[in-house]
Each structure stands twice: as C-alpha cells, then as structure tokens.
Amino acid sequence: MSFRNVVSKSELLREKSELSAARSVDKILTTKKDVLLQRLSGLTGELDESAKKFLTALNEAYTYYLYAIATNGEEVIEHMGRASEGRLEVEVFQVGYMGVKYLEVRPKIIAKTASLDYNYSMLMSKKPELVSSLTSFATLWSFAIKLINELKETDRLINALEKVIIPEREERVRALSLVLEERDREELTRIKKVREKLRGA
C-alpha cells in the first residue's frame, strides 16, 4: 500500500491545525521574550541604584564603627554590641512575574536600647538601613538571575519551534496537499474517461 493511498483530508486538516497551534505558541513565546527582555533592561538600573544604596549604608556604618572604636576602644564597643544586641526577623514572600517565581525578603530589626555614645548610636541606627538595602539588592539580583534563566528557556523553545517543529509541519502539510491534489486530478481523469466510455456506448 503506497503513501498516496493512506493519506486522507482529515489528516491534512489535523496537520494544518497542529501547524496553526505551533505558530500561535511561537507568537506567545516571542511576546513573552520581548516582555522579559524589557523587564530585564529596566532591572539593570534598579540593581545599580540598589547596589549604590547598600554601599553607601555600608560605608557610613564602617565610618561610625571606626569612630566608635577610636573614641571608646575596641573592648568597650564589643561590650556595647552585646548589650544592645537585638534580633533580626524576616518575612519571605513568593512573588511571580510572567511565570518567573522568586523570593522577596523583608527584614525587620528589633534592637535593644542601651546607653551609648553618639558614634555607636549612629552605627546602630544604620543597621536597619544596611540590612534592608542588602536584602533589597539580593532580591533584585536573584530576580535578575531567574529572568535570565527564563529568557534562555524561552529562547530555546522559540528556536525549537521556528527551526524544527514549524518547518517540519509546513513540509508535512505541503506533502499531504500535493498527494491529495494529485489523487484528485487522477480521480477527475478517471471520471472523464468513464463518461467518455458511457457516451460512446
């Protein structure tokens, strides 16, 4: 039995339907890729700003720490640190963006109060800002990495569709269409011959 005899119009319709679905998925993934690229592009500015904020807070904290040691001595500062030690609480939320899931961390420092000198008090006042800017930067960095990974995966799927799946479906639709057209022509020729025989009889 030849390939021409087993081909049916329903098979051609099914192939056309699958080709149409593959093209729709390709369009959706291309749109997703564009949106992810746009978000990643905007994220670079946010990352820069967040890194600057953290480094500024860290620099100020080190400055006050060095002043505090210079005015009180390292041993006194160590005792003050133990006396005013608080605790850090964090709330963690799972956030999503275009199917990309990442964790957002919100810190909260609960500090003890203690009788401290000015520089040490200033150092302690920088703790919440320092922790907040660090977690903010870490969250953005983690989000950026996840966006990059999602972009790679989306790009891989688009390439598979555009270079393998869609061309294969298009070739299959072409081949089926040619076979069915050829079969229809043969059928028409056969009908004409039968008519001619009937007229001659």
Image (cartoon, rainbow, N blue to C red):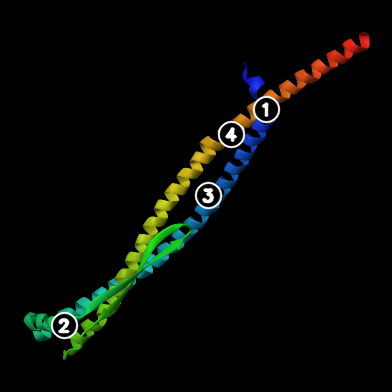
| Front of the two marks 3 and 1 | 1
Which element carries disc 4, helix, strand or loop?
A: helix
Depth order, front residue of 167/195: 195
Which residue carries the number 3 mark?
29
Say which residue appears at 52% left-offset and 40% top-offset. Answer: 161
Residue 196 lies in quadrant: top right
Residue, disc 2: 67
Please say if 198 is above or below 155: above
Give the amino acid at mark 4.
Arg
Q: Residue furthest bottom?
A: 115
Q: Earlier in the sequence, mark 3 or mark 1?
A: 1
> Label 3 amino acid?
Leu
Residues at badges 3 and 1 in contact (C-beta under 8 Å)? no
Q: Which residue is mark 4?
A: 169
Dot 1 lies on which element? loop
Task: Quickly name the residue at label 1.
Answer: 8
- Name the residue type under label 1: Ser
Residue displayed at 62% across by 17% down? 2
Q: Residue at x 17, y 89 (%)?
A: 114
Q: Position of residue 137 (x, y in %)?
A: 33, 67
52 above or below 123?
above
Q: Which residue occupies 65% across, 27% down?
A: 176
